[in-house]
């Protein structure tokens, strides 16, 4: 008997392929990556657009006037209505994007999808009624990872009732109520009432800033913070879908929006819809901006479930 030769087959392990970039993500990334390379002349030309709308602080839009040259450039480019090679030729006729940058964008999109799915599957609700310090740490972790956290068991119903009673009394004072009511910044039968700094709106609890919330915000901002404004939002029926929109600028740890429901919210009311993992900024701004721009245009979130 002659021994038969044996054949050894060695398998080469290869990393899983990166997901293909959807067209809208790719196009947005081209915009954001090139806009990150603005020349000094093109940067000045871009910021000049803000001079007129931002010269009067009484009428200036803080969100617009806080926009960077890169954000203005990316938003204009992403709209597809402007020939960027003519508007900003110094940048768009010379800047380029490497294959490594596209690989980085694919990796960022994959990481975003994994983050979003985890937040959807695990949820963003935590019981904040046990221990303020421990609950604040848990709340902070979810907020930083998912961009939103819902705190259960933190609201004092008696305080909310007093707040509502005070709002009802405020509505009876025609002049003061009219001065505090805003119908311009919202739309589709929505309005907001700015609360005056008078009793009972002078305590943290009456403004919805309970101890656990204070602790989360202090740790999130890594220091002292201030309340910009407090208002009562009313959405009367019927009204239209607001579509996806950012409530705060896309800057890391500079602004947080805190919402307290003054009545039970049902599915029929059209509850607020959050896109997980879109609240935190990123060191790779061009990647996170490309994803957020795509979600805003699509009108739905990644892994929203």
Image: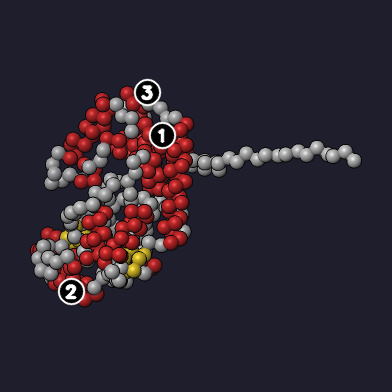
> Residue 294: percent from the left, percent from the top?
41, 44
Q: Residue at x 42, y 30 (%)?
A: 97
Res. 209 image quadrant: bottom left
Residue situated in front as seen by the camera: 204 or 16 = 16
Looking at the image, the residue that sits furthest to the right is 1
Res. 123 image quadrant: bottom left
> Residue 170: percent from the left, percent from the top?
13, 69
**Mark 1 falls on what kind of element?**
helix
* Cα distance in 3D space between marks 2 and 3: 62 Å
Looking at the image, the residue that sits furthest to the bottom is 158
On the question of residue 41 being in view, the answer is yes
Using residue 262 as the reference point, say whether residue 93 is left or right of it: right
- The residue that disc 2 covers is 162
- The residue that disc 3 covers is 94
> Residue 161: percent from the left, percent from the top?
21, 74
Q: Residue at x 46, y 42 (%)?
A: 107
Q: Residues within 10 Å of mark 2 (few under 14, many from 20)?
A: some
Query: Which of disc 3 and disc 2 is earlier in sequence?
Result: 3
């Amino acid at each position: 008997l002659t021994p038969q030769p044996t054949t050894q087959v060695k398998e080469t392990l290869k990393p899983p392929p990166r997901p293909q970039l959807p067209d809208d993500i790719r196009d947005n990334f081209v915009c954001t990556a090139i806009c990150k390379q603005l020349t000094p002349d093109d940067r000045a030309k871009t910021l000049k657009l803000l001079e007129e709308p931002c010269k009067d602080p009484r009428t200036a839009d803080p969100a617009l006037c806080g926009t960077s040259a890169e954000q203005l450039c990316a938003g204009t480019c992403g709209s597809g209505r402007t020939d960027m090679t003519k508007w900003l030729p110094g940048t768009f006729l010379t800047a380029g994007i490497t294959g490594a940058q596209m690989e980085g964008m694919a990796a960022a999109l994959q990481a975003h999808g994994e983050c979003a799915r985890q937040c959807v599957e695990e949820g963003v609700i935590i019981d904040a009624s046990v221990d303020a310090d421990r609950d604040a740490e848990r709340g902070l972790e979810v907020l930083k990872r998912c961009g939103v956290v819902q705190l259960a068991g933190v609201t004092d119903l008696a305080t909310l009732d007093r707040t509502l009673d005070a709002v009802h009394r405020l509505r009876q004072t025609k002049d003061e109520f009219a001065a505090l009511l805003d119908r311009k910044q919202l739309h589709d039968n929505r309005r907001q009432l700015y609360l005056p700094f008078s009793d009972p709106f002078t305590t943290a609890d009456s403004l919805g800033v309970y101890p656990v919330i204070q602790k989360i915000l202090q740790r999130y901002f890594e220091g002292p913070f201030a309340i910009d404004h407090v208002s009562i939002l009313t959405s009367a029926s019927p009204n239209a879908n607001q579509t996806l929109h950012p409530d705060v600028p896309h800057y890391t740890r500079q602004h947080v929006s805190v919402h307290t429901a003054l009545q039970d919210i049902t599915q029929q009311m059209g509850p607020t819809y959050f896109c997980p993992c879109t609240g935190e900024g990123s060191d790779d701004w061009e990647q996170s901006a490309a994803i957020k721009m795509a979600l805003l245009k699509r009108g739905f979130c990644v892994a929203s479930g």
